[in-house]
Image: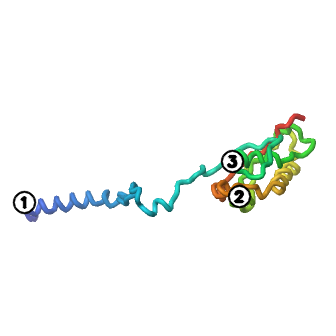
Amino acid sequence: MTIPATRSARRLIAAFLLAAAWAGPVAAQDLSPREDHDDPLRRLDPSPSLPEGINGTIRPGEGERTEKIDNLNGIFSALQACWRPPAGSGFSGQEVTLRIAFKRNGDVLGKPRITYYRAGNMPDQREPFTRSIQEAFTRCTPLPFSEKLGGAVAGRIFTFRFSDTRPM
């Protein structure tokens, strides 16, 4: 046996169901005032000034050593000036990709990680090749970052690809 619902009871049930269906999406929305430019917390959360990862290639050659490094190109030039590939390797085609981060003062943060190695045509040169890269960081670090650059790159991941492209 069904109980006949009155018109007002049906309206009340319909209104309740409509309110319940509408409340779910509204509750899921982010109604915080993110677009408020006068928000004091927004000023404390600056936008990132650099991309998450900075990539570059280091090749044998003459780089410049400077008193202060104030841009990203200066970092790559300084490492290129410090790197001395092993004698006799010539154009071996070897490549090492290294991930590393720096502290604000230019020291290496943590332990550098080799993420890729290509043997080229002289696989017996692997040990001297990777040792020459380690020696380059020993010679160069701490890198002489300017105060602004040191603050900007501190903790950021750099990916350096050391590529032996010298003629034999």
- Calculate the distance from the C-alpha at mark 3 to the C-alpha at mark 2: 12 Å
Judge depth for marks 3 and 2 and give the one in front. Answer: 3
Q: Which residue is mark 3?
A: 72
Judge depth for marks 3 and 1 and give the one in front. Answer: 3
Left or right of 98? Residue 82 is right
Q: Which residue is mark 2?
A: 102
Q: Which residue is mark 1?
A: 7
Mark 3 or 2, nearer chain start: 3
Seen from this angle, which residue lies furthest front? 67
Seen from this angle, which residue lies furthest right? 88
Q: Residue at x 72, y 62 (%)?
A: 110
Seen from this angle, which residue lies furthest top? 167
Q: Position of residue 141 (x, y in %)?
A: 79, 57
Q: Position of residue 84 (x, y in %)?
A: 86, 47
Nearer to the camera, 157 or 147:
147
At mark 1, the secondary structure is helix
Q: Residue at x 70, y 57 (%)?
A: 101
Nearer to the camera, 70 or 51:
70
Quadrant of the image containing the N terminus: bottom left
